[in-house]
Image (spheres, coloured by chain):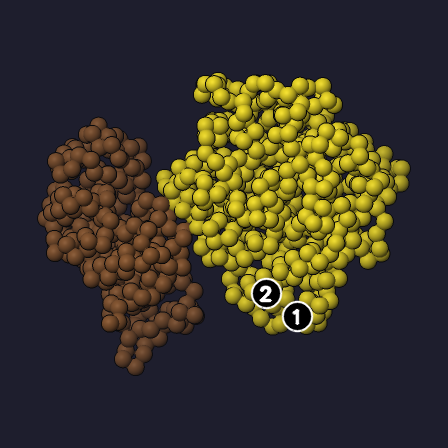
Chain colours: A brown, B yellow
Amino acid sequence: MSSRRGLVDRTLRFSTVDGPGNRFVVFMQGCNFNCIGCHNPYTISECNSCGLCVDPCPENALSLDEDHRVVVDRVACTGCEVCIDVCPYDSTPLAEDLDVDELVARIRETAPFLSGVTVSGGEATLQAHFVAELFGRLRADDELSHLTTLVDSNGSAPREVWDLLMPVMDGAMIDLKALDPDTHVRLTGRTNTAVLDSIRYLAAAGKLHEVRLLIVPGYNDDPATMERTLAWLRDVDPDMAIKVIGFRVHGIRPEMSWLTDADPDRIADLADLATSAGFRDVIVV
Amino acid sequence: MEMPEFRTRARQIVEDPTLTFHQRRHHLAYLAENALEYPPLSDAAAEALEKRVICDLYEGAAPYRARYILPDYAKALRQGSAFLELDPPQDLDDALTFLLILYAHVPSITAYPVYFGDLDKLLVPFVDGISDEHLYRSLRRFWLALDRMFPDAFAHMDLGPRDGRIIRTIFRIERELEQVVPNLTFKIDPEVTPDDLIRDAVETVFVNGKPHFVNHPLMVRDLGEEYAAVSCYNSLKIGGGSHTLVRLNLKEVALRHQGTLEDFFTDTLPRYAELTAEIIEARIRYLVEEARFYDHDFLAAEGLISLDRFSAMYGVYGLAEAVDLLMEHQGKDGRYGHDPEANDLSYRITRALKAFVNDRPMPYCEGNAGRCFLHSQSGIDSDLDVTAGTRIPIGDEPEMFEHIVAVTPHHDLFDAGVSDIFHVEDTARRNPQAMVDIIRGALGGGMRDFTFNLATNGFIRITGYLVRKSDIEGFDAHGARHGSTTFAAGSVKNSHVTERNVKRVIARELTPRPGR
């Protein structure tokens, strides 16, 4: 049986910021949210082969094949990302159609240097079968079974998807963009019913690695909002790990220019609220 | 050197407002040594030295002490010293005082000791019944003395591989005091050293850029259990050391090469390799037979060093440029560190050098079965447009994983040390386990020496040694208390150390010419 294929934006051999220890990170292409503050908006959509990026490529690494699909000459490509800059559809022609075998081979090369593998995105759970097969392969492999498996997710997946992943996943890191549904819609384009349910479901199963609270000035950075969010989280699990992340404008889409960087002092104050609320594992980024 | 020039230079040193009294005296001694004739060399060797194809690191024309000396401090603590009129110490504070006194009498190329011992092991017999607080206070006082009495970043201490409260206390003091001295090497044995202790060391690096990490099993394979890394990346035998360190500039060799690639391996490289060996041999013979260092020094008389544990260090540098030049000769544009063929060529060069050193008998080198140790020399402040040792050029390093994979095959060959430095982003500070993972992976994969530093702490790693950023900035106006800051100031001016990008690391090491 051939292994499953997935659309992968890119892989990173070493990362110190995607979970505990040094981690191999797989960024999946495609996301069902449309967050105003997205730092890698080119991972949102799948390439539609419109071809607008072909001419601007300074290395002539892009072309349209006979099926009118954009193809990449990976030897010529220098990774300058001009194609990403000109893409009007929040996508990239550089995403790779990879099968699990190829990905496992890349991970194997790096494995002695790793604590684990994190699948991020994009939204990893949109390609849950691919992720589940990848994690299953890692667990079944004597050389790779020491690697912990984490998913970095927007939390929109239904319980059926988590049921598929849980047997082979050590934990999920879930972004809670806002507790208030309206604010959540303003920040992400979607309501948060599924996100809140994922947090409850994962916590109950002992698979909630951490909840990330991205603090965006003017949206969710007032203390009262933070306290309501913390109260809800404490009700779910008072021992969960919380990461408080101050929003940064770096990498966001130019049309979102009204957004501003979070003030580090304010973030520290909000993080103190988490500590005061009894959370023991609070990290500020 | 004629007398008028000698007098002019002596006067410049005496009147140099940026040198302390001790530094002036050191430079005057160097000037006097260099007024003597160099040990006899063939015309070809003398010319190669003159043209700096081969560099003797300005050790001096008449070597009268070994470059690196690693006294057997454990033996000294057991037997005391007749020369110093000291009985064997009986308790912790006696032992620390004993060591301070002994350090003051250990010669080296820099005039300061390059090795303070494997302190955590040395003190084990003295800490039974000592409270944690007593241990901390005594070691803290000792640490202040080390930095103030031996102000040279090449003064080096080794720790590990075993866990214990002495090494834990030392890491704590290191983080509290943020001193340049002592420089530190931490020996890691994957079977013995716990993650938790490596994490403690990693967190110490986050504060002050120390320690370096070495592959203990690989060192033991090449040097035996009784080894230490001294000065910086110089791994040698305890109770012995290295007579001298002479280095071959592979870039200059490649520039002088004409003909095919095969000719490089059968003619050009062996020719210069032998000239390097000739210079090393001449220096060793002078030191041992004429200056008779090992006949008169009390360390030898008391058995704290013995000639049969010495060898010499055969250094190489400029591998990156040599590889790129040889690729160009063949009409190829692959670069060292990036192109598989260029990397393979680099391994072929270092293997050829290793074979040469292994086949070339060297007098008074019983510490390595009558052969030199091979060493990847990490640079000095006057190096321009040439990359240290076997490193990938500054600013041209690939990502960390590719970087490690590219340089690791060299590490097996360099028994006397090899340095590759990794600069990591500040985000690692929140995730020390990530660095533990990388260190374990790197050493497990065959790296011998591993050094990393963060972009943001108050120290700057010039080559292997550290200086405070604030010391460099103030140097021109005021001079500096640490001898090594003088070298670092030159290194910063001659390169772009302070302007580098994250993970971009400059590469210079070791004592350049004093009295410039």
Q: From the top left corner, tell me how far across and down residue A2 is, in percent.
A: 26, 71
| Residue under the image location 52 percent in, 51 percent down | B447
Q: Amino acid at mark 1?
A: Leu
Write down the residue under mark 1.
B261
Q: Which residue is mark 2?
A: B345
The reply to whether residue A86 is visible in this rendering is: no
Dot 2 alpha-carbon crowd within 10 angstroms: few under 14, some 14 to 19, many 20 or more: some
User: How far across and how far down the image is residue B118, in percent?
Assistant: 57, 33
Taking the image as shown, residue A84 lies to the left or right of residue B149, namely left
Where the C terminus of chain A falls, by quadrant?
Answer: top left
Q: Position of residue A129 (x, y in %)?
A: 20, 62
**Residue occupying image coordinates x 46% and y 30%:** B164
* Residue situated furthest front in the rendering: B79
The residue positioned 85% from the left and 34% from the top of the image is: B7
Whether the residues at callouts 1 and 2 have beta carbons within 8 Å, the answer is: yes
**In the image, is B310 to the left or to the right of A202?**
right
Instruction: Give residue A196's quadrant in the image.
Output: top left
- Amino acid type at mark 2: Leu
